[in-house]
Image (cartoon, helix red, strand yellow):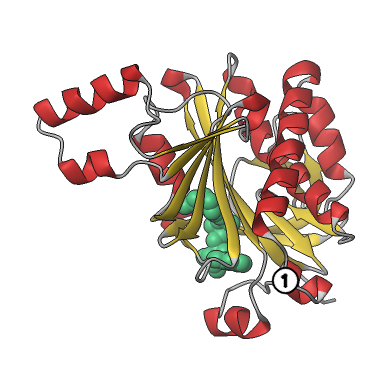
Amino acid sequence: MEVTSKFSSYSKFAKVQFVKRIRNGGSLKEVKNMPDKIIKGEGLWNGRLLKFNTLESTNVWAVQHIDFCQNGDVIWAVRQTMGKGRLSRVWLSPDDKGLTLSVVVEFKNNRIIPAVNFAAALAVNKTLKMFSLKGSLKWPNDVLVRGRKIAGILSEAKPERNFVVVGIGLNVNMKKSDIESANFSFPATSMLIEIGRPLEMDILRKVLVSSLEKNIDSLFIHGTKVVIDSWEKYDWLSGSLIEIDTPAGVIKGTYNGMDEQGRLRLIDKNGCENLFWSGDVKKVVAVD
Ligand code: BT5
């Protein structure tokens, strides 16, 4: 493992890119917004860990600096100040109590993009299991413990560049008071709350990265079906009556798992199957 510090660690190619950016009117601030440390061998497939002490959003940084990124890079912010969720929502990780990272994955076939999200959710689930926690998965991008959200995933693809940035936010050392004051729309929890002791972020990150590597390898080798089949074993919505909130309105019906592309299947009151690429889902209690 080689630990290198800011600037001196950049490749000749990256340095040339910085100079070009400045000459083309790029700001010094933009150039300065570079990792505090680059650690080789701690990314996926022996790739790089790009460590930031503070960063607004690991996903935003990765997407904006995709030219600088390599397949398997892990972008890790010890403190993330403006984390984002889907639809420009906010992902909160107060102080440095959450694990917030993004992984850059290169692909050849666009069809795997939705399944990368599920492979990442399974990796989080496996990580929780290593710490004796029983997780479940909620379509499309949540990981829950005891029905409470402990992690969220946000994948952003750059199909024209054959890269997908997979962002993971995991609540690690957040206290009950942190969760309560955040007033989330869906109940939430953290590993500290569930296990009863704080966890070492470095260890947790390494376990998660190793698990991500295995699952993404499995996706590339075996294809989306194997990942979706594994995901369905932990499906929190299984057999539930649900409501899905979509841009077209709220639709109610019976949850029927996912199709082979990762779309949610909902059987409506007429017995027809409806498929959804995205949406917010909640369980509803049947009222007769
Ligand atoms: C997600 O969106 O759950 C995806 C979150 C992805 C965050 C990671 S952190 C690393 C990387 N860099 C980024 O900038 N993002 C990724 P969504 O399903 O839209 O859920 C967002 C909603 O979850 C918010 O509107 C809140 O209600 C709730 N929420 C926010 N922070 C939370 C937290 N720490 N724990 C539980 N719920 C939270």
Q: Which residue is mark 1?
A: 198
User: Which quarter of the figure has residue 142?
Assistant: bottom right
Apparent side of residue 180 relative to residue 198 in the rendered image (left or right):
left
Q: Position of residue 104 (x, y in %)?
A: 53, 31
* Residue at left offset 57%, top offset 20%: 110
Quadrant observed for ligand 1 in the rendered image: bottom right
Query: Does the beta carbon of the residue at mark 1 sit less than 8 Å from ligand 1?
Result: no
User: Which quarter of the figure has residue 185?
Assistant: bottom right
**Quadrant in the picture for the C terminus:** bottom right
Type of the residue with mark 1: Pro
Residue 285 visible, this orientation: no
Apparent side of residue 117 relative to residue 23 in the rendered image (left or right):
right
Local crowd size for mark 1, using a 10 Å CA cut-off: few (<14), some (14–19), many (≥20)? some
Answer above or below: position of 32 versus 110.
below
Q: Position of residue 102 (x, y in %)?
A: 54, 42
* Residue at left offset 38%, top offset 55%: 56
Which residue is situated farthest in the top direction here?
A: 108
Residue 28 visible, this orientation: yes
Q: Position of residue 105 (x, y in %)?
A: 57, 27
**Quadrant in the picture for the N terminus:** top right
Camera-nearest residue between 35 and 276: 35
| Total numbered labels placed on residues in the image | 1
Camera-nearest residue between 89 and 19: 19
* Residue at left offset 64%, top offset 30%: 44
Element marked by disc 1: loop
User: Which quarter of the figure has residue 39?
Assistant: top right
